[in-house]
């Protein structure tokens, strides 16, 4: 298990509403939809579940590189992220999340395609479960995973947010 010496957070505004960004000294480890006041309980449960005993400290400087890249993404100036990532999850989840990082900006794949790519063709539901537990949405682009029929199904932040992200990337036309 990785040893983290510190856990920091800051908030930012986005086209999806406020985001709370959480970073360890190893990299970004969690993005929650909402303000710190709205997400603090969820963040604390997540930290406890993953045996992270550090204090959560407000530190704008430590989180700024992630916020800068997210702002560039939302402005259409960035198509991939290169901030350090501290990926925390089960072995299977991490395999799925690594596969998601391989979906290029502006493209989508189905849960079934991801299942085949990771060598678990019958694990479509498990892929959906891992997708739903993605701790770093947007940067790990779980929004790019859609139903086999092209439907925008499931997104931890809500399908409306998934739709906005895919519109930003030009994967779908703006729905009026």
Image: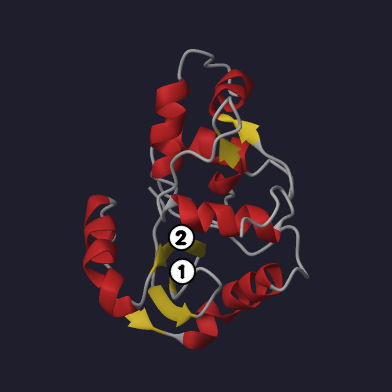
Q: Is residue 60 left or right of residue 110?
A: left
Query: Seen in the image, is 114 located left or right of residue 11?
Result: right
Is residue 86 something that shows in the picture?
no
Q: Residue furthest top?
A: 122
Vertical arrangement, residue 72 with respect to residue 58, above or below: above
- Whole-percent x, y for residue 54 in the image: 29, 70
The quadrant holding residue 33 is bottom left
Q: Which quadrant holds residue 35?
A: bottom left
- In what element is the residue under mark 2? strand
Q: Is residue 164 above or below residue 50?
A: below
| Residue ID at (62%, 24%) | 113
Q: Which residue is mark 1?
A: 23
The answer to which of 36 and 98 lies nearer the viewer is 36
As rendered, which of 152 and 39 lies closer to the eye? Answer: 152
Residues marked 1 and 2 touching at CB (< 8 Å): yes
Give neighbour class at mark 2: few <14, some 14-19, many 20+ (Cα, 10 Å).
many
Percent position of residue 1, x then y: 38, 47
For the residue labelled by badge 1, is the local secondary structure a helix, a strand or a loop? strand
| Between 80 and 73, the one nearer to me in the picture | 73
The residue shown at (56%, 36%) is 146
Mark 1 nearby-residue class (10 Å; few <14, some 14–19, many ≥20): many
Q: Does residue 17 lie above or below 148 as drawn?
A: below
Q: How is the image coloured?
A: secondary structure
Residue at 75 percent across and 66 percent down: it is: 78
* Residue annotated with mark 2: 29
Res. 80 in view: yes
- Mark 1 vs 2, N-terminal side: 1
Camera-nearest residue between 170 and 128: 170
Quadrant position of the C terminus in the picture: bottom right
């Amino acid at each position: 298990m990785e040893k983290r010496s510190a856990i920091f957070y800051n908030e930012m505004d986005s086209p999806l509403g406020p985001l709370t960004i959480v970073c360890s000294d190893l990299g970004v480890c969690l993005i929650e939809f909402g303000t710190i006041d709205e997400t603090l309980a969820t963040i604390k449960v997540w930290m406890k579940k993953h045996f992270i005993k550090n204090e959560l400290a407000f530190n704008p400087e430590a989180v700024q590189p992630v916020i800068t890249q997210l702002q560039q993404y939302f402005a259409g100036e960035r198509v991939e992220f290169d901030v350090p990532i501290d990926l925390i999850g089960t072995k299977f989840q991490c395999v799925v999340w690594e596969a998601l990082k391989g979906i290029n900006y502006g493209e989508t794949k189905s849960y079934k395609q991801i299942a085949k790519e990771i060598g678990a063709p019958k694990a479509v539901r498990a892929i959906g479960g891992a997708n739903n537990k993605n701790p770093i949405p947007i940067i790990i682009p779980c929004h790019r995973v859609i139903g086999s029929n092209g439907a925008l199904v499931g997104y931890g932040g809500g399908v409306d947010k998934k739709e906005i992200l895919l519109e930003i990337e030009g994967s779908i036309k703006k729905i009026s």
